Image (tube, helix red, strand yellow):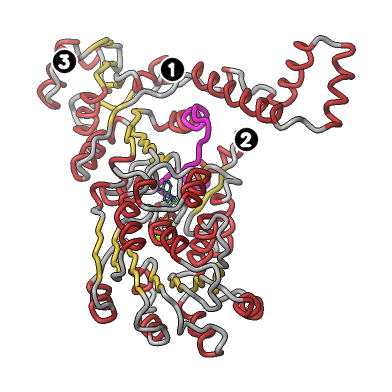
Amino acid sequence: MLSFEELGLSEETLKVLKKKGFEVPSPIQEVTIPAILNGNKDIVAQAQTGTGKTAAFGLPLVERLDEHSRSVQALVLTPTRELAIQVAEEIHSLKGKKKLTITPIYGGQSITLQLRSLKKGVDIVIGTPGRVLDHIARGTLKLGEISYLVLDEADEMLNMGFLEDVKKIMRHTPANKRTMLFSATMPKEIIQIAREHMTEFDEFKVSKDQLTVSQTDQIYFEVSASNKFEALCRIIDIEEDFFGLVFCRTKKDVDTIANHLVERGYDADALHGDLSQPQREKILNKFKKHLINILVATDVAARGIDVQDLTHVINFALPQDAESYVHRIGRTGRAGKEGNAITFITPEEYRKLRYISRETKTDIRKATLPDVKDVIKTKKIRIRNILKDIVEASPRSEYMEMSRELLDTNSPEDVVAALLEYSFQDELDEKNYTEIGNALVDTKGKTRLFVTQGKKDGLTSQKLMHFIQNKCGVKSKKIRDVQILEKFSFVTLPFHDAELVLSYFKGKQKGKGPFITKANKARENG
Ligand code: ADP
Ligand code: MG
């Protein structure tokens, strides 16, 4: 793996990267940055979404453009206005002290505003094809002198039917410019453009397998349906800076979970297909700005969300199939950061998880839920950090004054404790966490099962063990705590064996023999 220093970037840019927190170049950056900086060929680059393609062309552009140019030097075409804005912001954040003007132009924004900034002179224009053509037609955007043309997210531009517009725009650009095409996938129409419009080009491809999945720690928790919500809260609380997507199967579940979270004081919101486009955008924007840090969504609603830097993707419910699993978890662990993919499964779902793990050729590790004591420990650390930050930034003077007054008549311990209580109330109270305990039969790896027959049906321990062994293939030595009561019975099995038994009975009608389901507490007690 190369470092940014080795890619030939200037001192100023290295400083910017350090400040931005980029530690090492992503694989696509590693290959395109030196090629653009040192060579002169056109570029075709393919790498998955979220792998830092913007900086892959943005950094060398910033390095190579001239601060004293009087005409537009580079044009970046993007499929949507959101992307135009995003790319403009990213390049802006990379330019450091270099005097370059970067302007996004896109449909929907007032054209006069855009005219004004174009008139003042712009070095890099980032725009959607339609609006760029408008400006060309009005004579307000002149591309005759550009040195670089970037087609960003080329496959999306193709999907959105911009191919002809892009070709039209290309006709207004000089022959000696360098063209750079960046895309997540390379459909043949795009290769075609490259062949027709580029003379000699370097091709870079970062294969899919190298990415995302290996960057993502995948674990699962065995948890009964009724304990899923509690488990979710613990996972969020144990994290110092949770920023994640929670996937549910239905719109109803999405709403229920999001509402519960909000009731418990979390900054959460719901995203599903029933929302109007403006509502959807509003929620997404809040999420992107980290005003909310938990977004509960269905698969469909989450499609096309381009939020970066998620710390977690949580499968509150298992996805439909292996492909959706990959889609869901592909959203975390981006651009060199380790992400966490967490899946909740009930005993009945174990087999499906195994299938997904096989299909995706990934290892999904079993883990145990964080303990309440540890969750509270993390919360304390978080509170300490918040306070430390405020102290370091010096608290407001009106509070300093009040602080002195309070300390005149009270002890420091009392005052600080009172303020903590005032601010955090019962947040550190263990009682806030429902005991996942008894149902922990599941999480500790065992499941209690309920059998519909008892003594009065002639059932004995021996008979029940035989029955389970013969029908479901579970060895009798794994069977524990057999309890034969008058009308029904109980047995305890290791989680996976219980799953076998439950799936044997799933969908079957109750017949003459014993019928087995999961035990619930109420039944066991009475
Ligand atoms: P793509 O265009 O490939 O989908 P982006 O360019 O939008 O990806 O980058 C995804 C995110 O990764 C952005 O938030 C960006 O700032 C960040 N990023 C890019 N390169 C790096 C890097 N080398 N280290 C850390 N983060 C990076
Ligand atoms: Mg991109």
Q: Earlier in the sequence, mark 1 or mark 3?
A: 1
Dot 2 lies on which element? loop
Q: Is residue 137 left or right of residue 114?
A: left
Amino acid type, residue under disc 1 in the picture: Gly
Quarter of the image with the C terminus is: top left
Closer to viewer: mark 1 or mark 3: 1
- Provide the residue designation for mark 1: 437
Instruction: State the image coordinates of residue 254 (x, y, percent, origin top left).
Output: 48, 47
Q: Earlier in the sequence, mark 2 or mark 1?
A: 2
Closer to viewer: mark 2 or mark 1: 2
Dot 1 lies on which element? loop
Q: Earlier in the sequence, mark 3 or mark 2?
A: 2
Q: Is residue 237 magenta?
A: yes
Residue at left offset 50%, top offset 46%: 15
As drawn, 384 above or below 335: above
Q: Which residues are magenta?
A: 233-255
The answer to whether the residue labelled 1 contacts the one labelled 3, judged by CB atoms less than 8 Å apart, is: no
CA gap between label 3 and label 2 equals 48 Å
Instruction: State the image coordinates of residue 28 (x, y, percent, origin top left).
Output: 32, 54
